[in-house]
Image (tube, grey):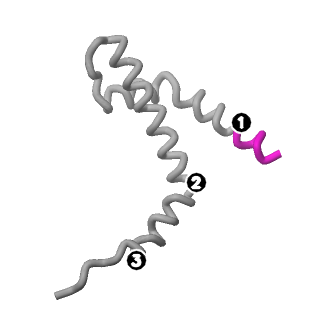
Amino acid sequence: MRSPKKSSEKKPVADFAGQSSLYKEFLAEREEILRHKWIESEKQGTDIGFEKALLDWIRKHREQWRSARRETKSNSLK
């Protein structure tokens, strides 16, 4: 019988994910979508669901959000 893996054995993968800029961007975008879902659900008085919020956010906000995020990053590197 194999012994259960220690959490330290999984740490390199977790560290990589935490360091990955692509993963950080994914998490930031997901957070914005969840915020949009909450706002739109409050407006409509019912939960609109993640998929509807995702599509609505992409259509209405994603391009501007990404541009602002890129600008903020480039300014912080100066």
Q: Which residue is mark 3?
A: 9
Which is nearer the N-term, disc 2 or disc 1? 2
Give the residue pinned by disc 2.
Answer: 21
Mark 3: few/some/many CA within 10 Å (<14, 14-19, 20+):
few
**Mark 3 secondary-structure assignment:** helix
- Residue at the extreme bottom: 1
| Extent of the magenta region | 72-78
Q: Are marks 3 and 2 in contact (CB under 8 Å)?
A: no
> From the viewer's perspective, is the residue at label 1 or at label 3 nearer?
3
Relative to 64, say whether 46 is above or below. Answer: above
Residue visible at 64% across and 36% down in the picture: 69
Mark 1–mark 3 Cα distance, whole angstroms, equals 38 Å
According to the picture, the residue beneath numbered tag 1 turns out to be 71
The tag earlier along the polypeptide, 3 or 2, is 3
**What residue is shown at x 37% (from left), y 27% (from top)?**
53
Q: Position of residue 25 (x, y in %)?
A: 54, 46
Tag 1: residue type? Glu
Question: Label 2 to label 1, Cα distance in Å?
Answer: 16 Å
Task: State the residue at coordinates (16%, 88%).
Answer: 1
* On screen, residue 53 above or below 21: above
Q: Quadrant of the C terminus?
A: top right
Q: Residue at x 38, y 18 (%)?
A: 40
